[in-house]
Image (cartoon, grey):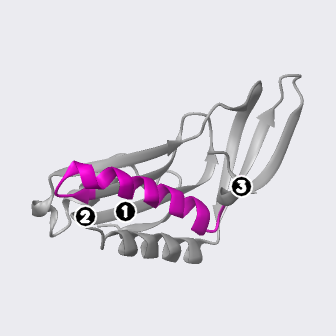
Amino acid sequence: MTSHAGVHKKGTFSLADLIKNVKSQRNFNKAGAIAIFIGVVRGEITEGEKVEKLELEAYEEKASQVLADICKDLKKKPDVTDVQIHHMLGKFQQGENLVYVSVTGSHRENLFPVLQEAVNRYKKEAPIFKKEHVKTKKGKKRAYWKTEQQASP
């Protein structure tokens, strides 16, 4: 079983792994719902500007610790039995999965706000960096590094 949170090299953790991990938790018998967010590479970031690829890097040890701390904190919320955040690192094309966030609990109503908070917090707090390779509507190619804090919503 993988930990509740962390950064992973592309191809080493999947959505199926997440679900297996969630269902293997010892208190899963208290769960009535699993809410999952899957972040993917968007194909267009501004009107006419196309994403050709993304490169994701992190201060891995610190990023994994921050993600684990977020999960531990959010797991204290009412009716929440588990929170997991798994962020991928490497080179990605449009449509590929970048991050999995799950919140498990006894009632669905309480899960969605926690899921949104988990996503907002990892984007603000985790030292994860992306290099966007884009092509403008005039065909010019450019690349630049961004932290999650600077990323488009």
Quarter of the image that includes the C terminus: top right
Asked if residue 73 lies in the magenta stretch, the reply is no
Q: 95 or 35, which is in the foreground?
A: 35
Task: Tell me the amino acid under the disc marked 1.
Answer: Gln
Reading the image, the residue beneath label 1 is 84
On screen, residue 123 versus residue 132, left or right, reads left
* Residue 97, image x, y percentages: 50, 43
Residue 8 in sight: no
Question: Which residue carries the number 2 mark?
Answer: 80
- Circle 2 residues within 10 Å: few <14, some 14–19, many ≥20: many
Drawn side of residue 15 relative to residue 63, left or right: left
In this rendered view, identify the residue nearer to me: 91 or 38: 38
Q: Secondary structure at mark 2?
A: strand
Name the kind of residue labelled 3 in the image. Answer: Gln
- The amino acid marked with disc number 2 is Val
Q: CA distance from mark 2 to mark 1?
A: 11 Å
Task: Give the residues in magenta.
Answer: 104-130
